[in-house]
Image (cartoon, rainbow, N blue to C red):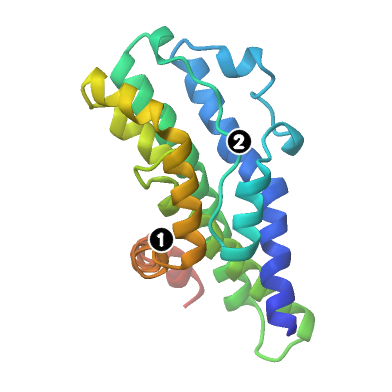
Amino acid sequence: MTVDNILKYGVRVLIIFMILPVHEFAHAFAAKKFGDRTAENMGRLTLNPISHIDIFGAICLVLTGFGWAKPVPVNPNRFKNYKLGSVITALAGPLSNVIVGYIGFVIYKIIIFSTTNGLSVAWDYVQTILFYFIIINLSLAVFNLLPIPPLDGSRILTTFLPLKYQWKIQEYQMYISIAFIVIIFSGILDTPLKFLMNLLYKCIDFLTLWVDLIFR
């Protein structure tokens, strides 16, 4: 295995223990703000990775770069505003990945502009680690917005569906999730996900142009 691959898989493990907890904490925090303390009462309003890790989601993340944590329990009936609360709570997780990815992008650019080419192998490794850190965060944001259980996008979708369709999705959620895992490992989603991730990457690159302007 090359050094590049070692760093890539290392960052994926780092994401599992550092970023997925942020993602799930964001869901729990948003739910609490809209009036639902279910996640808080079940100990999910925390950054402790042990409370959030889903074994299958973690394995998928390490092997494919796409994955998920244990979904935060949410009772939208307790929201002060049902639809708004449901949508914002579902979006909070992917948005946290975008924010973290943005911060990583700023640091990445500062390091790129502040160091001389060939200054040290260590700095090259730092840049590579940051690059993978950015890519994986943005990939997670795009991936989790897919409207398929157990991902966040499915929560947004069901918010606007008639009740009978919501019950149907819940009834077959386990089968949908199993089929989805098979699809992930088959690689069918790789091309569309990478296309969407590249679009998001370009947007973040544009939003960090102020760093380029400062250093140039």
Q: Is residue 78 above or below residue 101?
A: above
Neighbours of disc 1 within 10 Å: few (<14), some (14-19), many (20+): many
Tell me residue 129's x, y (percent): 67, 69
Q: Amino acid at mark 2?
A: Lys
Relative placement, left or right, of 94 versus 100 is left
Tell me residue 195's x, y (percent): 34, 68
Q: For the N terminus, give its image quadrant.
A: bottom right
Q: Is residue 120 visible?
A: yes
Q: Which mark is residue 70?
A: 2
Residue beneath disc 1: 204
Q: Is residue 89 above or below residue 5?
A: above
Q: Could you say whether the residue bearing mark 2 is in a helix, strand or loop?
A: loop
Tell me residue 51's x, y (percent): 72, 31
Q: Quadrant of residue 9?
A: bottom right
Question: What residue lies at 72% left-to-right and 72% top-to-bottom?
Answer: 7
Q: Which mark is residue 174?
A: none
Earlier sequence position, callout 1 versus callout 2: 2
Question: What residue lies at 44% left-to-right and 58% top-to-bottom?
Answer: 183
